[in-house]
Each structure stands twice: as structure tokens, then as C-alpha cells.
């Protein structure tokens, strides 16, 4: 029996997941990036770390059967299953107010950083670092010169990944509100977290 | 700066400095923090977005976690291989590589230098790994190759805000990145 938490378009949600707990992150309508974050529930100064994970797996992104590790190099998430075209990013920072300002947006624009802060604060975690996100479904090809491309997410409606918490965690997922750069095909849509 | 150690300096906005590989094949972990608020620091993930590339080219900037330019890459007198993908080595890294007892690490070097500069409370940013040769394969795999630098190879950078600049002569001697012979580097304020 699973419990579904819908993450509305442009918003974020956080939930506690116990060690051993499995969950799906689902792209409900397709073509939507999910900025995913995992913090150690006992001490949120420990969190999933892109740069430590790359060293741990010797690759830009883990494969199913591998782990994401924390900034203390401890496994925090196990990547159990990838029911997507297999394209994800762990190179780019979460979008934030400065990103939209730089893209020429005037006034407020929703961002993954604000979504994360708000979702974590709702669970009582007011002070957090902003980790470099696990950008599920995000399509940032790297060419042989190290140039990054910004392409629409290739996911179809219902595509998902299954992850397992390796310690008690606070999981946060933001339905990326980016609508200037084409990563969400110009149309941010909702996601779901299914607790299995 | 002796092999396996770190040093730092407060560098004012506009000041240029050089990081030199004195004997060749030595990786340097470089960090920059905003001088009056060390919760702002150079950020690999924001810099990649800023330059749309894994590493800036000469004429481009490194930016902070608030997307403001902090370092300008003025000149690159090396074969042009640098890394901004891998974490600083730390005690848990060497433990994982099977080292028993203590081992010098870039994270400890950074903490010590920042504490000496009066900033004991810092985040550990993902470093700018100058001279570090971590090629990315077409399938996204990373390899750990010896640095390609010759003695005297260097980069010239300019601080774009008042900053603490810290460099660590990476003490990694298990992986091949320093050709298993950590050697000294120099930080020259111009």
C-alpha cells in the first residue's frame, strides 16, 4: 500500500523517510525535471553530495544498483530502479532567485531553492545548506569539450525512479519551475512522491 | 607551500595571484570565500551553469553560491586540464582507500588555514581542482589520471571581491592524480 504525495507544478514537498524505506519519484505528465534532495534526519548538516557521489561511483551519475553518498561519504540513497530513458543530471545548481534575475525575469519567480527552503522549514528545518541537487529526468548532455547543453527532459508521463533510504532521511522534491530555459519544455508540470 | 600542506591569504578585490606547480604533476585544491561573509563561496555547480561548461576558460569567471563573480581566470599556462567534479579528499576518503591511521587531506588543510585566518566555521565547498586530470568518458565515467603539468606551469587569477583564497597541495598518494608523489606548489600574490 503506497502513499502518494503530489508535488504541484512549480512547488516543493518534503517528507521523512525511515532507513530502508523505498519511494518512487514520478514524472506525472512527462518532460518535467525533479530537483531531489536528501538530508540525514538526525543532523541536516549531512546531506547527499554530488561531488562525493561522483567520486564514489567514478561516474557523473550513479547507475541502478549504486548509491548516492553524503558529504561524509556515507550511503544515503540506493538507486533501485530507473523506469525512464536513463537521463539525469548532477552538474547544475538548483535554480534560485539570482538565476531568474540573470535570465532577465523581473519580479518574483518560483525556484527550486525557495521550494526546498520552504518544504524543509515546514518540517522544522529552518537552517540548511543548499546541496547541489540530484536533478532527476534532467537532460544536460556534456560534449567532448566539456560544453553543457540544456535539452528538454525526455521522460514520458508515468516515468519514474525507485530509491531506497539508507539512513533516516528528510527527502525533498521540487517540481522545477524553470520556464525560460527549455529543460521542462517551457511548461512546468507536477510530480509525485510515492512512499512504497 | 610544502607538499601535502595548505596556505591561504586575504586577497582584496582586483588583486591578481598566481598558483604555480613548482615540480610538475601536482594537483591543487583551490577555494575562495567572500571575506566579510564566508557563507558565500565559489561554487562549482553555479559556475558550471554560469559558463555552460565543466570548467571556465581564460577570460571567464568562477561564481559564488549566490551567482556573483568571485574569481576571474586570467591566464592558463598549463596543458589546460583542470577538474571541478570531485570532492576534496578528506579523512573518510583515505579510510575508504584502506589507509590506516591518519593521512593529510585537502579538507583538513582547508579547515586549518581558514581557522588561522579567523574563520573556524565554514562549509567545505567543492574545490576548483587546478591541474587535476579527471577525463569524462562518453558514458559519463570518470578516470583518475596523473596531472599533465610541467615544473613552473601556472594559472593567473584575479579576485573579483575581497576574498579568502586557500590552496592545498593535494596529499593524495594512493590514486594517481599526483603521480603518487605529492610535491610543493606556490601561491604568488601579484
Image (spheres, coloured by chain):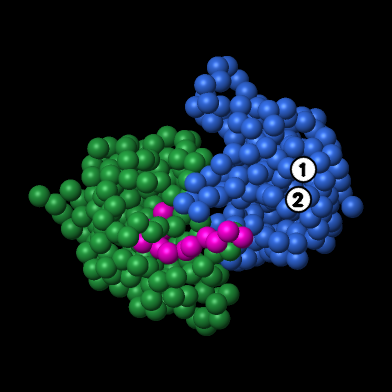
Chain colours: A green, B blue
Q: Chain of mark 1?
A: B
Q: Label 2 near label 1: C-beta < 8 Å?
A: yes
* Front residue of this view, candidates A34 and A41: A34
Instruction: Write down the quadrant of residue A183 in the picture.
Output: bottom left
In the rendered view, would you say A99 is above or below B10? Answer: below
Mark before the other along the chain sequence, 1 or 2: 2
- As drawn, the residue found furthest toward the left would be A1
The chain letter under disc 2 is B
* SS at badge 2: loop
Residue A166 appears at what percent x and percent y?
A: 32, 37
Q: Is residue A176 left or right of residue B15?
A: left
Name the residue at 71% across, 45% down.
B131
Residue B50 sits in which quadrant? bottom right
Report if residue B148 is visible in the image: yes
Q: CA distance from mark 1 to mark 2?
A: 7 Å
Q: Are marks 1 and 2 on the same chain?
A: yes
Magenta includes A138?
yes
Q: Secondary structure at mark 1?
A: loop
Q: Quadrant of the image for the N terminus of chain B?
A: top right
Position above or below: A165 against B57:
above
> Which residue is at 86% across, 46% downward?
B188
Query: Which residue is tagged 2?
Result: B79
Q: Which residue is mark 1?
A: B149
Magenta-colored span? A130-145
Against A127, residue A55 (above or below) is above
The overriding secondary structure of the stretch rendered in magenta is: loop
Nearest the eye: A31 or A177: A31
Taking the spot 65% from the left edge, 44% from the top edge, the residue there is B133
Judge whether residue B115 can be spotted in this image.
Answer: no
Amino acid at each position: 500500500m503506497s502513499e502518494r504525495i503530489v508535488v504541484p507544478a512549480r512547488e516543493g514537498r518534503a517528507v521523512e523517510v525511515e532507513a530502508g524505506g523505498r519511494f518512487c519519484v514520478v514524472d506525472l505528465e512527462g518532460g518535467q525535471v525533479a530537483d531531489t534532495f536528501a538530508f540525514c534526519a538526525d543532523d541536516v548538516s549531512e546531506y547527499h553530495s554530488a561531488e562525493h557521489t561522483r567520486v564514489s561511483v567514478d561516474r557523473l551519475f550513479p547507475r541502478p544498483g549504486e548509491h548516492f553518498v553524503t558529504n561524509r561519504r556515507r550511503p544515503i540513497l540506493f538507486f533501485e530502479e530507473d523506469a525512464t530513458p536513463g537521463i539525469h543530471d548532477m552538474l547544475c545548481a538548483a535554480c534560485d532567485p539570482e538565476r531568474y534575475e540573470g535570465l532577465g525575469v523581473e519580479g518574483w519567480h518560483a525556484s527550486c531553492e525557495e521550494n526546498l527552503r520552504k518544504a524543509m522549514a515546514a518540517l522544522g528545518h529552518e537552517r540548511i545548506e543548499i546541496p547541489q541537487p540530484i536533478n532527476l529526468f534532467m537532460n544536460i548532455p556534456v560534449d567532448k569539450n566539456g560544453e553543457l547543453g540544456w535539452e528538454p527532459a525526455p521522460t514520458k508521463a508515468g516515468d519514474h525512479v525507485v530509491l531506497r533510504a539508507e539512513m533516516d532521511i528528510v527527502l525533498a522534491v521540487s517540481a522545477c519551475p524553470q520556464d525560460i530555459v527549455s529543460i521542462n519544455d517551457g511548461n512546468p508540470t507536477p510530480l509525485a512522491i510515492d512512499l512504497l | 607551500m610544502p607538499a601535502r600542506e595548505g596556505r591561504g591569504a586575504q586577497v582584496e578585490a582586483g588583486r591578481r595571484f598566481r598558483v604555480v606547480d613548482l615540480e610538475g604533476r601536482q594537483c591543487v585544491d583551490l577555494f575562495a570565500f567572500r571575506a566579510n561573509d564566508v557563507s558565500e563561496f565559489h561554487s562549482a555547480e553555479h559556475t558550471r551553469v554560469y559558463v555552460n561548461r565543466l570548467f571556465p576558460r581564460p577570460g571567464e569567471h568562477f561564481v559564488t553560491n549566490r551567482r556573483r563573480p568571485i574569481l576571474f581566470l586570467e591566464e592558463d599556462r598549463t596543458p589546460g586540464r583542470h577538474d571541478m567534479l570531485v570532492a576534496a579528499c578528506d579523512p573518510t576518503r583515505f579510510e575508504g582507500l584502506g589507509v590506516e591511521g591518519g593521512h593529510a587531506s585537502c579538507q583538513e588543510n582547508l579547515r586549518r588555514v581558514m581557522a588561522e585566518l579567523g574563520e573556524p566555521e565554514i562549509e567545505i565547498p567543492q574545490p576548483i581542482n587546478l591541474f587535476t586530470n579527471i577525463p569524462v568518458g562518453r558514458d559519463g565515467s570518470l578516470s583518475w589520471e596523473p596531472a599533465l603539468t610541467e615544473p613552473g606551469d601556472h594559472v593567473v587569477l584575479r579576485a573579483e571581491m575581497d576574498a579568502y583564497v586557500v590552496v592545498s597541495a593535494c596529499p593524495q598518494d594512493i590514486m594517481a592524480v599526483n603521480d603518487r608523489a605529492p610535491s610543493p606548489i606556490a601561491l604568488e600574490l601579484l
